[in-house]
Image: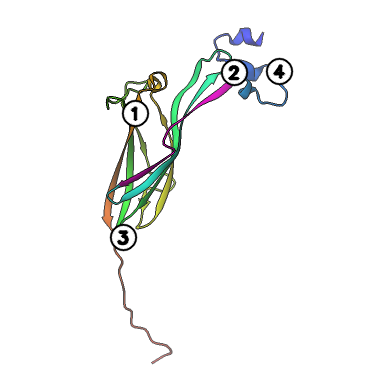
Amino acid sequence: MLGEQRGGIAAPAVIAGAPSRVQGSSLASAAFEDKIYAVAPVVVELNAGIIAGEITDMQVVQRVERISGRVITPPKLVGTLRLSSSSETHSVRLVVAKIQYLDDQWRPMKLEDARTEVTFKFARHGIEWLDPGQEAIHAIDVAFPPEALKDRKLSRLRLEIGYVSSPYREAMFSIAVSIGSQ
C-alpha cells in the first residue's frame, strides 16, 4: 500500500517508510553500499613556489543500490589536502583550487555535466590565509568522471591552486615610558 502510493519514489523513501524487519543493522546500509576505489599513490607531495603540502587518503566513493547495482550517488574523489606557506617573508591567501582528471593521452576527462574540471574555494573555516610556516587542512570532496571508473584510463590528476602572495611585515615601535611621576 505505502509502496503503491509512492510508486515513483526512489527505493530509500519506500524502505524508510516501511516497517523494519532487518535487525542489528540500519535500513540504509541494507539498501545501499558505498563502492570505494583506492587511488595510488596514497600520499602525493606538492611543492610549487611558496606553497608546499600533500594530498593524502585519496579514494573514489560511489554509492550504489545493493540489489540492482544502480548508481545512486555519482562518483566523488575524497581525500585531505594539506597546504603550508614555505615562505619566511610572505603570507598567502588561498583563493581557489581546480582539479582536472587526465587520461592516458593527457587529455582532460569529462565529468557528468561535460565540464572538464572541478573547482572549490578555500574561503571557509578561516583557512584561506597562511602566514609564514602556517599550515591549513582542507577536505577534498569533489566530482569524479564516471568514465574513469569504467575505462580505468585515468593517469594523472592536475591540481591548480590560485593564491595571492603578500609581503609579511613586522613593525617595531619604541615608546617612551617612565615609572612613577616626574
Q: Regarding mark 1 in the picture, which secondary structure is present there?
A: strand
Color scheme of the displayed model: rainbow
| C-alpha gap between disc 2 and disc 3 | 55 Å
Q: Which mark is residue 88?
A: 3
Q: Which residues are magenta?
A: 31-47
Q: Regarding mark 4 in the picture, which secondary structure is present there?
A: loop
The single residue placed furthest to the bottom in the displayed view is: 182
Across and down, in percent, residue 106 comes to 27, 27
Q: Badges 4 and 3: C-beta atoms under 8 Å apart?
A: no
Nearest to N terminus: mark 1 or mark 2: 2
Q: Badges 1 and 2: C-beta atoms under 8 Å apart?
A: no
Q: Badges 3 and 1: C-beta atoms under 8 Å apart?
A: no
Relative to 131, residue 59 above or below? above
Nearest to N terminus: mark 4 or mark 2: 2
Q: Which mark is residue 13?
A: 2
Q: Regarding mark 3 in the picture, which secondary structure is present there?
A: loop
Nearest to N terminus: mark 4 or mark 1: 4
* Main SS class of the magenta portion in the image: strand
Q: Regarding mark 2 in the picture, which secondary structure is present there?
A: helix
Q: Badges 4 and 2: C-beta atoms under 8 Å apart?
A: no
Q: Which mark is residue 155?
A: 1
| C-alpha gap between disc 4 and disc 2 | 12 Å
Q: Is residue 38 magenta-colored?
A: yes
Q: Badges 4 and 1: C-beta atoms under 8 Å apart?
A: no
Give the camera-side residue of 76 and 10: 76
